[in-house]
Image: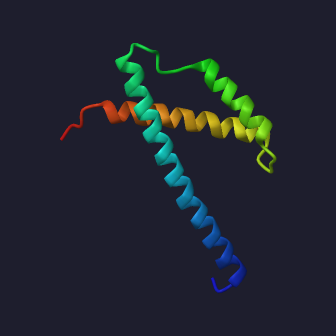
Amino acid sequence: MSDEYVAQVRRQISDLDRSLVELVNKRLKLVAGLKRYKDEHGIGFVDLAREEWMLQYLQRLNRGPLSGDGLSELYHELLDLMKREVTREQQPQTQ
């Protein structure tokens, strides 16, 4: 495609996607460290009250165009991904 506007927007989207991946990886490192700490100190990993508080906090900050339902879905998917990834990280690798 030779449309300059399309190419420019695609570059911006690609830049944002790279940033999102970097941020998700940073978040995952923090979550993994927190899980290790909680495991070492006998603290349960999942804190549903904290998750709900955080979602409500993000809902208040959200100015759109992401809908409240969309934000809720995104946040829950992110939390599920984090939980799967830190669990996967702790499993022994099979050859």
Q: Which residue shows up at 72% across the image and 79% down it?
A: 5
Give left or right: position of 60 versus 2: right
Q: Which residue shows up at 81% across the image and 46% down it?
A: 63
Give left or right: position of 50 versus 83: right
Q: Position of residue 35 (x, y in %)?
A: 42, 27
Q: Which residue shows up at 64% across the image and 69% down it?
A: 12
Give left or right: position of 6 versus 46: right
Foreground residue among 31 and 91: 31
Q: Position of residue 11 (x, y in %)?
A: 61, 72
Foreground residue among 67 and 37: 37
Q: Position of residue 25 (x, y in %)?
A: 46, 47
Can you say whether 16 is above or below 94 in the image?
Answer: below
Q: Quadrant of the C terminus?
A: top left
Q: Position of residue 59 (x, y in %)?
A: 76, 36
Can you say whether 35 is above or below 4 in the image?
Answer: above
Q: Which residue shows up at 69% across the image and 77% down it?
A: 6
Count of numbered labels shown in the rendering:
0
Residue at the extreme left: 95
